[in-house]
Image (spheres, rainbow, N blue to C red):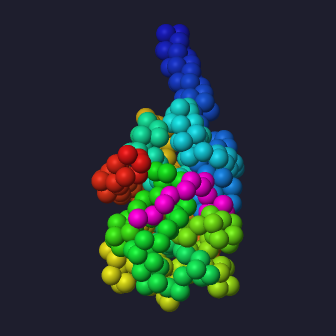
Amino acid sequence: MKIQIKKVTALFLTAALTMTVLTGCGENEKSYPDGNINLVVSASAGGDTDTYARILAQYLEKELGVTISIVNKGSAIEGTREVHNAEKDGYTVEFFHASSLLTKIVGKTDIGGLDQAICTVPVVDTTQTLVIPAAKFKDMDDFVKKATSGEEIIASVNQGSYAHLACVLFENAIGGQFKYVDSQNASERITDMLAGRIDIFFAPYGTIQQYVESGDFISLGIMSEERNQFLPDVPTFVEQGYDITMDKYFYFAFPPETPQEIVNTFAAAVEKSVANQECIDAFATYSIVPEYHSPEESVQILKDAEASYAQFKEVLSGQ
């Protein structure tokens, strides 16, 4: 009888110890995310990249249940590198666009978007346009005529950027030759065009819409396959005879080798966010429809973009 009691006691103690260990493990294991996330926006505050990041962050906070802190970087290279070198714990993520691929192609950096753990492409901006001053040109035909007849055309760009590539594509399409001057952002270009210092620059339509409506600028059209549903009166370059498309791909990316389960958790939150009608309405203000792409789809989108950009390496590098 004593032996049986000892056996029962031993079994009870073993079971109790096992439960204690399992309970302890459960208390120590933390699900992602359990703390605030730093969202590095590799652009200055106020531009399209920053605006789209802040819209998405608002709804991601609701889905993830944590605070997302926006950290703006004046330099895209700086922002991408900071995220690339961050801890692979999911608490530092970048929001930027495929211009990072161009920056690497032209040799301005050794790290581009595809060197990170791509999470998703939630925004494809199909409103990209080239604008000219109404004080100097009447319309597309007038601009092309002057640009191909020897008149100096000053294009304002940041070398190796979307703005640079867009101007190069159009320059090649019309057989013109632009003089390029350096600038860092749309705000600077708008000021220069209003002052009569430049003749053409690239921007999302929402950035320059008020100046088109006021009669100061003329949009040459949007650089997409089809007209934008929010801008039905703005023609595409394609329908005007210039086979130029330049959609702008915005992505979330984590440091390389970030665990896939973390990437997938964040991606799932993005998917729910862009399906939220309030988020959809917020983007509609900028003539954009947010759309989720899986990590695998997003990587392919950026790889295709990179392959397209690579053919312009020499001219974008200024060689």
Where is 135 relative to 308, above or below? below
* The one of 165 and 6 positioned closer to us in this rendering: 165
Residue 250 shown left or right of residue 190 in the figure: left
Q: Residue at x 43, y 71 (%)?
A: 150
Residue 176 seen in render: yes
Specify the quadrant of the image occupied by residue 37. top right
Residue 268 seen in render: no
Specify the quadrant of the image occupied by residue 302. bottom left
Where is 87 relative to 216, above or below? above
Where is 167 relative to 40, above or below? below
* The one of 228 and 168 positioned closer to us in this rendering: 168
Q: Which stretch did the figure color magenta? A: 177-188
* The one of 298 and 223 positioned closer to us in this rendering: 223
Residue 242 in picture, x, y percent from top left: 34, 77
Residue 92 shown left or right of residue 318 in the figure: right
Q: Residue at x 60, y 54 (%)?
A: 184
Where is 317 relative to 14, above or below? below
Residue 220 shown left or right of residue 133 in the figure: left
